[in-house]
Image (spheres, rainbow, N blue to C red):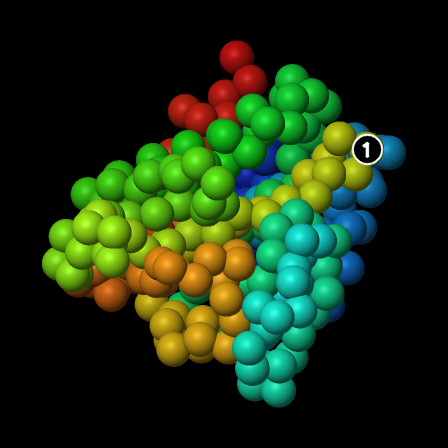
Amino acid sequence: MTPQTRVEIDQNGVEWHISADLVPYPEAVAVMEDRAARIASDGAPEAIWLLEHPPLYTAGTSARPADLTDPDRFPVHVTRRGGQYTYHGPGQRVVYVMLDVGRRGRDVRRFVQQLEAWVIATLAEFNVTGEIREGRVGVWVARDDKPLTASGRVSEDKIAAIGIRLRKWVSFHGISINVEPDLGHFSGIVPCGITEHGVTSLVDLGLPVTMADLDVALKRSFDPVFDLA
C-alpha cells in the first residue's frame, strides 16, 4: 500500500494493511481502486487498510454544497462513495474495506449492516455503547453528560462514519472511527448533513484509547461479524 505499511494475513486470507504514516487521499483512492479491480478480475486477496489521512474533507454522492461551511479550510475531495461531507484527519482511524461482497452474499443492505455491527462490536470492547439511528448514517453514542436537546431528548454524538462504494460486487471506501482527532475540524462542514447533533471521539468520552488499541479491537471483532461460514 505504502512503504511504511505493515501487512498481516488473518486465518481467512484477508490482508490487513496498517500504515504508520499519513496517507494522501488521492493515493489511497488509487490503491483502493486498483485492489478492488484485482479482487474482481484476478481473485486477488481481500484487504482491509487501516490508516490516517492529513486533514481534509470528502464529499460523497449526496453532498450538498451548503454543508461545506468553510471551503478554504482544508482540501476538499469529491468522491464517489455514498454519503455526504465527512472530515478525515490525524487521530481518526480510517478503515478501508476491499471485500468481495459477491462472495459474501450479494446483499448490499446486509453488508452495510455488517459494517455498522463491526463498529458497534469494536466500541463495545471499550465499554462504549454504539447505536444506529433511523435516517442518520453512522454510529452514535448517547451523551448523558450533556444537556438535553431542545425537544427534551438525551444528546447524541456521532463517533463513526460509514460510506462505501461497490464495483463488480467488490467494496471500497469504508468506515472511520474517531479516536482522538481535533473535533474542532468538523466545524468546517455539516457532518453527514446533520446539524442537531455533535461529534465525539473515544478520548473525548474519557477513554485513553490508542490507535493500536483500536486496531486490536477491530481485528478481534471482524470474524464474528463477517464470518463466511
Residue in the picture at 65% in, 35% down = 99
Image side of residue 102 versus residue 42, left or right: left
Q: Give whichever of 206, 33 is nearer the camera.
A: 206
Instruction: Judge the density around disc 1: few (<14), some (14-19), many (≥20) Cα neighbours within 10 Å.
Output: few
Quadrant holding the N terminus: bottom right
Residue beneath disc 1: 168
* Coordinates of residue 136 in the picture (x, y in percent): 46, 45
Q: Give whichever of 152, 21 is nearer the camera.
A: 152
Image side of residue 104 versus residue 206, left or right: right
- Identify the image quadrant of residue 58: bottom right
Residue in the picture at 69% in, 30% down = 100
As drawn, which residue projects farthest toward the bottom?
Answer: 72
As drawn, which residue projects farthest toward the front?
Answer: 151
Q: Secondary structure at mark 1?
A: loop
The answer to whether one can see residue 101 in this image is yes
Residue type indicated by callout 1: Lys
Residue in the picture at 55% in, 39% down = 9
Q: Give whichever of 134, 209 is nearer the camera.
A: 134
* Coordinates of residue 123 in the picture (x, y in percent): 30, 44
* Coordinates of residue 75 in the picture (x, y in percent): 64, 79
Q: Give whichever of 219, 160 is nearer the camera.
A: 160
